[in-house]
Image: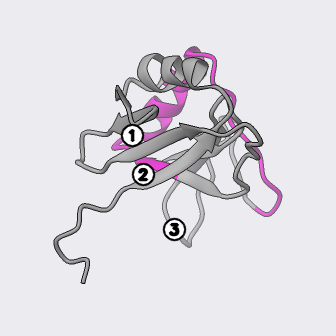
Amino acid sequence: MFKDSKAFSSFSVVDLSLKKQFYAETLGLDVSDEMGGLGLHPVGGGEVFVYAKDNHVPATFTVLNFPVDEIEAAVDRLTEAGVTFERYDGFDQDEKGIARGAEGPAIAWFKDPAGNILSVLQ
């Protein structure tokens, strides 16, 4: 049924103007104004739609993951850009906030200005 459909992900934020700056400048994504929201265009070909919602509540789960070749370099660049990394109980995270476990990739979580959880992972 959906074999030929180009699916995309979406999530909400409170104010699009500040989020556009964060996604374009801080994260370095190609961002476009689309359908009253923002289109995020990661290099890998996936598409993400970010829309404003007056009663936005941040997601309690990771809404967007960015695979990287070198997680420490990515975390360092984001930290220099003012991004703060989250710490979660139950994960053995180093001083930079990177969790390295036997189960799964090395991963570090951070939030966008609307409080949605994002990650970099290797």
Q: How crowded is mark 2: few (under 14 residues within 10 Å), some or many (20 or more)?
A: some
Dots 1, 2 in contact, CB < 8 A: yes
Q: How far apart are marks 3 and 1 (CA)?
A: 15 Å
Is residue 9 among what the camera can see? yes
Identify which amino acid the numbered label 3 is placed on.
Answer: Gly
Left or right, 112 with reference to 3:
right
Mark 3 and mark 2: Cα distance apart in space = 9 Å
Q: What element carries label 3?
A: loop
Q: Distance between the residues labelled 1 and 2?
A: 7 Å
Residue at the right extreme of this rendering: 89
- Which sits in the foreground, 33 or 115? 33
Q: Name the residue under label 1.
A: 70
Q: Give the range drawn in magenta.
A: 64-90
Q: At 57% across and 15% down in the image, what residue appears?
A: 80
Identity of the residue drawn at 44% across and 30% down: 73
Q: Quadrant of residue 4?
A: bottom left
Kind of residue indicated by mark 2: Gln
Q: Earlier in the sequence, mark 3 or mark 2?
A: 3
Please give the name of the residue rendered at 68% of the width and 44% of the height, measured from the top-left corner.
Answer: 94
User: Which residue is tagged 2?
Assistant: 122
Left or right for 106, reference 116: left
